[in-house]
Image (spheres, grey):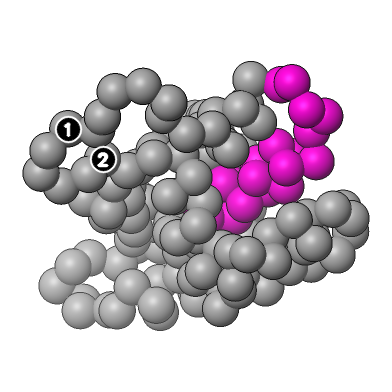
């Protein structure tokens, strides 16, 4: 019989690494994030032997598994990538995508589509940070790691 800790470590190594592969570079809408969260919690419930009839809240399941929420995992991965991109030297394609604006053409009418930098701003603001101060936070690696951990959880 495996302990809960061992089950969670195997789950993180096998299932989550595949589930979240390149998730920091994908632009996920809220609906997609909720679906990932449902899958994540459903698997945790199965591993912990908790059925939906037991009516155990999601927070209790995450606490028992000693894992962060899916939203925190996704945000953490994106913020880590943001730190790398901001510290990159000029001329790199990823940096152009983050700082670039559309010079010709227009965006479609109706609800505007999410952009790469919009998702980063949302994650950064979730930690009660001002996006204007981003450059000063990211410029040094170790304080940025501490800041990312605070933003997420």
Secondary structure of the residue carrying numbered label 2: loop
In the visual, does 32 lie left or right of 21? Answer: left
Asked whether residue 67 appears in the rendered view, the answer is: no
The one of 110 and 86 positioned closer to us in this rendering: 110
Crowding near the residue tagged with mark 2, few <14, some 14–19, many ≥20 C-alpha atoms within 10 Å: few
Crowding near the residue tagged with mark 1, few <14, some 14–19, many ≥20 C-alpha atoms within 10 Å: few
Q: Is residue 51 above or below residue 128?
A: above
In the visual, does 50 lie left or right of 110? Answer: right
Rendered residue at 62%/52% (across/down): 79
Which residue, given by chain and number where applicable, does mark 1 sit on? Answer: 108
In the visual, does 11 lie left or right of 85? Answer: left
Q: Position of residue 83 (x, y in %)?
A: 72, 47
Front tag of 2 and 1: 1
Q: Which residues are magenta?
A: 73-92
Which residue, given by chain and number where applicable, does mark 2 sit on? Answer: 113
- As measured in the structure, the alpha-carbon distance from the residue carrying label 2 to the one carrying label 1 is 8 Å
Cβ atoms under marks 2 and 1 closer than 8 Å: yes
Q: Position of residue 81 (x, y in %)?
A: 65, 41
Which mark is first along the chain, 1 or 2? 1
Q: Is residue 110 above or below residue 148?
A: above
The one of 30 and 88 positioned closer to us in this rendering: 88
Q: Quadrant of residue 76?
A: bottom right
Q: Quadrant of the C terminus?
A: bottom right
Rendered residue at 26%/40% (across/down): 113
Q: Is residue 66 above or below residue 59?
A: above
């Amino acid at each position: 019989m495996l302990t809960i800790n061992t089950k969670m470590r195997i789950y993180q190594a096998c299932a989550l690494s595949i589930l979240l592969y390149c998730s920091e570079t994908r632009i996920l809408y809220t609906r997609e994030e909720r679906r990932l969260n449902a899958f994540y919690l459903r698997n945790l419930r199965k591993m912990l032997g908790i059925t939906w009839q037991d009516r155990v809240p999601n927070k209790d399941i995450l606490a028992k598994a000693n894992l962060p929420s899916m939203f925190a995992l996704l945000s953490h991965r994106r913020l880590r990538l943001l730190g790398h991109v901001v510290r990159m030297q000029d001329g790199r394609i990823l940096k152009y995508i983050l700082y670039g604006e559309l010079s010709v053409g227009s965006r479609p009418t109706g609800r505007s589509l999410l952009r790469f930098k919009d998702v980063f701003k949302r994650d950064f603001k979730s930690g009660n940070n001002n996006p204007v101060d981003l450059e000063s936070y990211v410029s040094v690696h170790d304080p940025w790691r501490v800041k990312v951990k605070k933003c997420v959880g």
